[in-house]
Image (tube, rainbow, N blue to C red):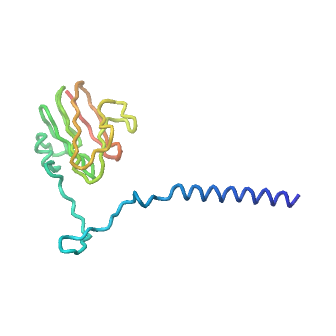
Amino acid sequence: MKSISLIIGLIVLAVLVAGGVYVYRTTQPNEAVMLDNSPLPDSEGAVDSQFIQQQPVGQPSADEAILESGTDTGDGAALLQDEVVVSMTDEGFTPTAVSLPVGGTVMFVNNGQGLHWPASDVHPTHEILPDFDAKRGLTTGERYSYTFTEPGNWRFHDHLHPSFTGTINIE
């Protein structure tokens, strides 16, 4: 009886070890697709590891976005007749609250270094206003525009960073 229990135990152990080896081998990163994050040499051959975040070419900064989109009310809100520009950065949206008339357009500009995905609430389904959804993460400098055809107070968020939120009031 002891030998049968020992054999069954060894078989179970062998299956677990084989399963662990299989999982380990199938989840190993492929060297061909690994990113090389090593710093590049400058024109003189020296390696500089300092990272300087640059503003995307042709894109407004967060401050410029407020100026382009209307009057800054001091509480993060900007008002405009027809179009508002909302800057998306790695810290969130600027401005976080805007007001437009029916037919007004909001243009989201990714001024951050990471991907940002503007969409209507509720995260993750975007069912409040399903057409208000970029459907993918926008890279640095990319833009997404949405024209609001119905009045309402529409909440939005960054699908990839759900704590980044804002409100669009359409009157």
The single residue placed furthest to the top in the displayed view is 150
Return the x and y of residue 161 as percentages of the image width and height.
Answer: 34, 47
| Residue 41 location, quadrant | bottom left
Return the x and y of residue 141 as percentages of the image width and height.
Answer: 21, 48
Q: Nearer the viewer, residue 138 or 91?
A: 138
Q: Nearer the viewer, residue 119 or 167?
A: 119
Count of labels in the image? 0
For residue 100, above or below residue 75: above
| Residue 6 location, quadrant | bottom right
Q: Is 8 placed left or right of 54 in the picture?
A: right
- Give me the residue at 34% from left, 30% from top: 128
Position of the C terminus, as image quadrant, is top left
Q: Nearer the viewer, residue 167 or 64?
A: 64
Q: Is 110 placed left or right of 34 in the picture?
A: left
- Give me the residue at 13% from left, 31% from top: 82
Return the x and y of residue 93 as percentages of the image width and height.
Answer: 25, 46
